Image (cartoon, rainbow, N blue to C red):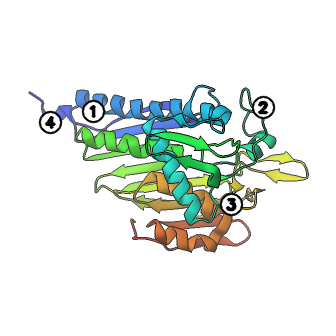
Amino acid sequence: MKFYSDIRAVERSQPWLGTLVSIRVEGLPVTRAHEAIDAAFDEIALVHRKMSFHEPESDVGRLNRFGHTRPLEVHQCTWEVLQWALRVAERSEGCFDIAVGRELVEWEFLPRPAEAFEVPAGSWQDIELHGDGRVEFHRPLWIDLGGIAKGYAVDRAARCLQAWDVQSGVVNAGGDVRVLGEQVERIGLELAYAVNPAPVIELTNGSIASSSGHRQRRWVGDRFRGPHVHGATRSSVPTDRFVCVLAESCVVADALTKVVMAEGSGAREVLQSLGAFAHRFDPLTGWEHFEGGKRLV
């Protein structure tokens, strides 16, 4: 018999995806809550293993070495992330492009892939997804899923919690957050600059993702560069901007932070098409708000 005193909020954290991932579950007996969290972390770990740029035997590692030589079979989760990435790339007219590994390697944000003998020259348009779960590159590419996989992992963990009958909970992967249930979750936005009052988003039953290049920026050549690349122009996105995007799914919110950071008001159409909306802070112009889909706060 489970008594009411055995039902309380349970929260745990683990390092995955280059950040600290925390999962909180409410409303379940403690033992079952831990089992649900274990299962959700297994989903996070799966995404980490399959989509790591750094691991030669991950799906991304294999594609970056051999994807232009023949179609390769990948895990279903990798195929789904690639499908989302191409969808956002098309709707943003290439502003979001996962095939920016060359630039990120040149700017030393990523290591040169092992056994990478050919310099990549393609874009998202050279990626073909076969219906049988294989992926093919029509030209040499170095893809990096760091701008979308974290949001997908959060969604996957949240779906796992729901399968365990979790009605109220939170998955937070370094600022990519999925809130389950009708409780209001207060999420502080961590800007690199002091802003008074400190911005807080109140979110219920939805997702938010945040992005900024300020803390990771480095001096390359004659300018500061960050880890965000405008896919259409192959230029570094200004590093002093902060963006958060709200959407039903975290994979959408995660990808769109890069589009809004680069395009600002030019991202309105893609926000609308994917049912999201955004806030962007620039130290020179202050806050801008871009309406898109239905309001979640």
> Is residue 129 at all visible to an observer of this figure?
yes
Q: Is residue 193 above or below residue 20?
A: below
Amino acid type at circle 3 is Arg
Instruction: Report helix, strand or loop for mark 1.
Output: helix
Q: Nearer the viewer, residue 201 or 274?
A: 274
Q: List the residue tagged with mark 3.
A: 241
Q: Position of residue 190 (x, y in %)?
A: 59, 52
- Disc 3 and disc 1: Cα gap in Å? 38 Å
Amino acid type at circle 2 is Phe
Instruction: Report helix, strand or loop for mark 4.
Output: helix
Is 12 on the left or on the right of 81, as rendered? left
Q: List the residue tagged with mark 4.
A: 4
Amino acid type at circle 1 is Ala
> Is residue 16 at all visible to an observer of this figure?
no
- Disc 4 and disc 2: Cα gap in Å? 61 Å
Residue 33 circle label: 1
Q: In which quadrant of the rendered view does residue 241 lie?
A: bottom right
Residue at position x 43%, y 38% from top?
A: 76
Instruction: Report helix, strand or loop for mark 3.
Output: loop
For marks 3 and 4 on the same chain, the one whose residue lies earlier in the sequence: 4
Q: Position of residue 198 (x, y in %)?
A: 56, 60
Is 49 on the left or on the right of 262, as rendered? left
Residue 145 circle label: none
- Disc 4 and disc 1: Cα gap in Å? 14 Å
Marks 4/2 in contact by CB < 8 Å: the verdict is no
